[in-house]
Image: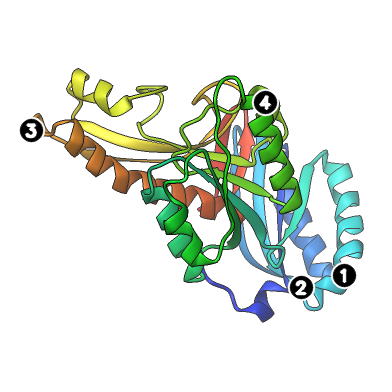
Amino acid sequence: MSQKLRPEILQNRARILLSCPDRPGIVAETASFLYRQGANIVALDQYTTDPAGGLLFMRVEFDLPDLPAQKKALEAGFAEVARRLDMQWEIRYAADRKRIAVFVSTADHALLELLYQWKTGELAGDIVLVISNHETLRPAVEPFGLPYFYIPVTPETKPEAEARQIALLTEYRVDLLVLARYMQILSPEFVRRYPNRIINIHHSFLPAFVGARPYERAYARGVKLIGATAHYVTEELDEGPIIEQDVERVTHRADVATLKKIGRNIERIVLARAVQWHLEDRILTYQNKTIVFY
């Protein structure tokens, strides 16, 4: 579960994310290594694709006294464990709050949910700028003290627009891009710069109704459930690894406007969950899927 941690806890908390061929002893070796360092494990989650010859995925969260002074030794020591067990791994530090850029167009519901959670301290990261292809949401953003950059996009100006966006992301040292109903398709060249670092909210329960106007298409199809999907962005439209989904039941009485109204609430909640899980290092990806340790 997400929780707001005190600064003195944050500075000494870290997480190991790893994957490797499954075999007996991996959890024991990891835990023993951390014990020898003087660490206290506060959460450990694991998943195997197959206990006999599959892949193991694991997230270990731990506290280590005086962690800032021990980072190099910790990483060097675990590198030896990882080498023996053929691990892909990374150590992430809770005090290193990720910096977020939010991309929007004209819809405000997903953006405002993120801004609220950030302003109240619930979001485990920091929104540092908002980029939009419209001026519409500037009055909603500027009271939060955030820079708002208007970058119009047309088919003819798309390369120049993306170059300006990339320059801003570099200037603001952005770690995560959140597409909060940004109604533009990013170029493959742009997406390749940020693998598993762009989260989109799609206003349907994927893989149903990929692409534009999903509520209109859902209405025409007479669906009884509508939903929303948060996923990492890849070069294939709406085909990236799914992080979170939710649905709500509807009836034949719901017109398109009603579907959109219900859908907006689902979208903002689903996107906020996915962003929070990414910020808390709870997501690993594998074969266009995600393993999410809630």
Counting residues from the start of the chain, the first of labels 3 and 2 encountered is: 2
The residue that mark 2 highlights is: 64
Picture quadrant where residue 40 is located: bottom right
Identify the element where label 1 is drawn.
Answer: helix
Q: Marks 4/2: CA distance?
A: 46 Å
Identify the element where label 4 is drawn.
Answer: helix
Q: From the top left corner, tell me how far across and down residue 161 is, in percent.
A: 64, 33
> In the image, what residue type sits under mark 2?
Leu
Counting residues from the start of the chain, the first of labels 2 and 1 encountered is: 2
Residue 25 in view, yes or no? no
The residue that mark 4 highlights is: 159
> In the image, what residue type sits under mark 1?
Gln
Picture quadrant where residue 66 is located: bottom right
Identify the element where label 2 is drawn.
Answer: loop
Q: Marks 3/2: CA distance?
A: 57 Å
In the image: residue 224, left or right of residue 246: left
Tell which of 246 and 103 is nearer to you.
103
Crowd rating for badge 4 (residues with CA inside 10 Å; few <14, some 14–19, many 20+): some
Crowd rating for badge 3 (residues with CA inside 10 Å; few <14, some 14–19, many 20+): few
Crowd rating for badge 2 (residues with CA inside 10 Å; few <14, some 14–19, many 20+): many
Residue at position x 51%, y 70% in the image: 121
> In the image, what residue type sits under mark 4?
Pro
Identify the element where label 3 is drawn.
Answer: loop
The residue that mark 3 highlights is: 253
Q: Check if mark 2's residue and mark 1's residue have beta carbons within 8 Å.
A: yes
